[in-house]
Image (cartoon, coloured by chain):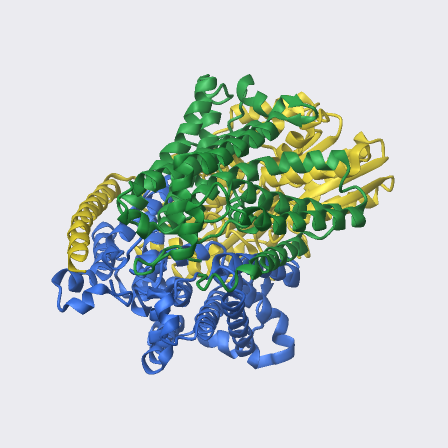
Chain colours: A yellow, B blue, C green
Amino acid sequence: MKTPKSQSCRGGMFRRSLFAASFAVAAVTSMATAYVSPARAAEKGSLIIGIDETASEYWAEYTQGAQDIADSIGTKLTVITSNYQGAQLLAQLGAIYATGCSKCALATDPSSNAFVKAVVHRSAVAQVPIVTIWNRPENIHPWDTDPKYWVAHTSFDGVMSGYYQMTALCKALGGKGQIAAVEGVPSTPPAYQRIQGLHKALAECPGVKLLDTQVGDWQETKSQNIVRTWIARYGDKLNGVFASNDAMARGAVAALREKNLNGKVFVTGSDGSKVALDMVKSGDMLVTVWNDPVLQGAVSISLAHAAAVGDIDPEKLTHAQRDFYLKQEVVDKSNVDQYLALKANAPKYTYDQMKANFWKDSAGQIPVGANK
Amino acid sequence: MSAFRGTGRAEGFDLAVALRRFVPISVLVLLLGASAIVAPGTLSFSALTGFVSDAAPLLILVIGSTMPILTGSIDLSVAGIASLTGVLVVQLAPIFGPWTCLVVLLIAIAFGALQGFAHAWLQIPSFITTLGTLSMLSGLSLLLSNATAQPLPDSDPFITLLSNTTFGIPNTGYAVIVVVALLALLMRYSRIGRDLFALGAGERTAVMSGVRTIRVRSFAFASSAGCAALAGLALVSVTEFSSPTLAGNLLLLSIVGVVLGGTAISGGVGGLWAGVIGGLITAWLRVATVLIGVAPTAQYIVFGIMALIAVGLTTDRGKIGVIK
Amino acid sequence: MKLVAKAGEVPGQPASRSLRFPARPGRWLQSIGPVAVLVVLALAFQLASHNFLSPGNLAAIAEAVAVPVILATGLSFVILLGAIDLSLEGVMATSSMTVALLAANNVNGHHWGIWAIVAALGVGVVFGAFNGVLNTYFRMPSLIVTLGSWFIGLGIASVLFPSQVPGIRDPIVLGLASTQFAGLSLIVFIAVAVLAIFHLVLNYTHLGRMIYAVGGGEATLVATGLRVPLFKLAAFMISGFLAALAGLLLSAQLGDGNADIGNGLLFPAVSACVLGGTLLSGGRGGAIQSAIGAVILEVLNNGLIQIGAGPYVRNIISGAVIVTVVAISGLHLRRKLRIVK
């Protein structure tokens, strides 16, 4: 009884001291990193962006746009990542604000509609101006919820995106055929807006029938599995796939490629990612809808910064200036080269350029009911 | 080898064993101290109260999850219950009015008890039982809410209570204390406390000495589900919106929290206090990466490594025979 | 779940049963349950949609189930020990980024060809070894070790991610998915081969027998002086290796590297093992059983799309089926198994 116990204890002590040593090393290293790290939040006038994930082309480009603005005014950009978890975003914002933050500005995706109010409120309490992107519940707006600090909300028109895609599908099919749709994460506005746009265009294209709609959660592999099942189920009857974003369009094309159907069954997507542009060029995809994340990053953080330094007074802005869509374009084979060139050499935005007119690229106020 | 709680106890005072109990809290203090040096201001009153309100849902989840884990089972459905709670509050408010939250809590507790009963009586492993129910719960949340975020009813008294502060401290912080106190009293003054540990430490022995497995397991899962529902309420008291995916990855964080406090995943070792400390460490690790300015791409790596090191420090291997 | 066998217990029955391994009469009986479920589900879906058993749809199921089968096979090794490996998704993410960045691609100048594949698979073995060493030599519970390496794997993939999705251009890597025999892609045959090989490893090698034995009663085995940690280490490395293979094959299928590639595949893999009759407490089950479990889940997935069930209802139904099947197939064990955690 006694022997194994004490042995395990001695072994335990050894291992524990090993752990303690490594922990101390880790703590010291991380502190050292912190001292040399340029991305500290506490500096004056620093810019903060909250993104959903780092391993994504879209968010890398969004960060690039915000970084351009930070460079142009000579300040630091702090990037926090929620990994699609609103609770995590809130906690991390709380930590940043706790260390003190004057003239900071925040642009963030609140990760889902449910966290918008909490994120805005948290920033307002810390007196940090905030611009939200993508997610906003229907019944709250920058002018009625913490209006002094919630500067603006900006997004891309999901209904129009879906409408553009479906219209292109209808045209390519000559107004006759069957399609199926893959939806994004159902609780996010772009997901249901794009499907709404699909139905709007479908009503104007009576010869095309929507066979099925399934949820692909924005993911490539899920979409691939769904489309594979559709091919087996509908065979020749499937003439087109409406994918709510480019990643799912990639999954759809991968599934079609297995049966050598790529290019024969039309696939549409949205976002304008590099791979999608390449596939539009090669003919694997029919269209994608170009949303410019670099521009979105530049516009959203500039607006927040302008409010932080007093270049604009949020409460004097019009509703159309505080709740607006950015322009988006349909990309098909005819104009794809132009966007590939833009992708290769994104313009480097500056704050002064943005300040000249923050709403130069606005596509108008977000209509009532868009976020229902 | 005695199967019951800690072999150290039978051998009188042992300095190493006594010291062990303070490892988790030392880790917490070390973390707090390190952050205070790196980012002065993190230990200010307002920063700490903010931290408490962000950490409360996770803390309550961790405390709840500790109960099944003490018996050697595991409850993977907690985040699903927390998300569904918010959705149910919105759906049931028109029917139950001011009593909605209470009703939802009771539903959750009943569900948990049923889940524990099914797992123990049918002898289905808890991992798979609760994995199955997790899938069902998330489907149900999506279905009931039609996959949208919905605003909570304005006047719900319980949620208003949770969202307020008393003496500058968020009421969700007091909720944590109440939960711990309630469970601690129950475990101290009824058989259930001893039985929980007995089951976890050596089920065969426990069964032979008259512990009623099914009853104890039902209790453990009922309390974890109840805590999960309360955590869900604490979350929606901050967001003011319900959503079918509200609690998201809190499941993984809550398991990390349980283990970081020194509770053995195999059961029989640990307790409520361990849950509180573990939950605090986890909540702090979640923000530490931001505080010390880790590049966002490296966040996951740093979190993973810090969690592993912390677990290495806080797990008392001396009390566990075979590690799986 | 019984993640840990208590040191004080004498694992009588299970250990002796698994040590008597090669001739186990009860084995076929045990796998009849899951197969019956599979047949019933397939017939039900065929009645409901008339298209379910068409060659085209069966091929679609085979394509979709290939990767889950590989994952479930690897996971079986760890679960048979009575341990668990939660790091699959992290390993897949890292292996996917590794192969996409080292094979010919449109982001950097590397063109390692076959060595990119080797590197991606090596990543999995390293992860497995990391898990195994922490679990056996540092005596940390596998649940928490592999939870940590799950995060680390996702993190490494994020760090590796270049600013745009890396598209794979290497013909060898792409060939894994695009090469077809008899209307099925090479991936399906790889999955079958993996299943066959690792089934043999489990049943006809010393390593396999020892893995069953460890799951049946580790404490007794340690007492006999066998080098238990080595077997456990090997099991984790196999699981990591096969997870990396799964990440590699999915990347080949999609033609790009993706940090989210394993998203949502872990829990179905665990469910597959349990559905097929592999016990989480270890010692019983096997690769074939787990593979059958994976097929059941995919049949459910495919069939529910075929009959047009809504996406939310799909979650509810598959959850219910998992619990019900496991409950029913465990009924005959109820009395024997006094302890289920």
On the rendered image, what quadrant is the N terminus of chain A found in? bottom left
Image coords of residue A252 (percent x, y): 66, 34
> Which residue occupies the foreground of this view, A163 or A15?
A15
- Looking at the rendering, in which quadrant would you find the C terminus of chain A? bottom right
- Residue at 62 percent of width and 32 percent of height: A250
- Residue B205 visible? The answer is yes
From the viewer's perspective, is residue B176 above or below residue B28?
Answer: below
Specify whether C306 is left or right of C150: right
Q: Quadrant of residue B178?
A: bottom left
Residue C35 relative to residue A53: left or right: right
Locate residue C185, reporting x and y percent.
64, 26
Q: Position of residue C212 (x, y in %)?
A: 42, 45
Query: Relative to residue C100, is residue C214 drawn left or right?
Result: left
**Image coords of residue A223 (percent x, y):** 64, 39
Q: What residue do we see at 53% from left, 45% from top?
A: C269
Comparing A109 with C79, the one in front is C79
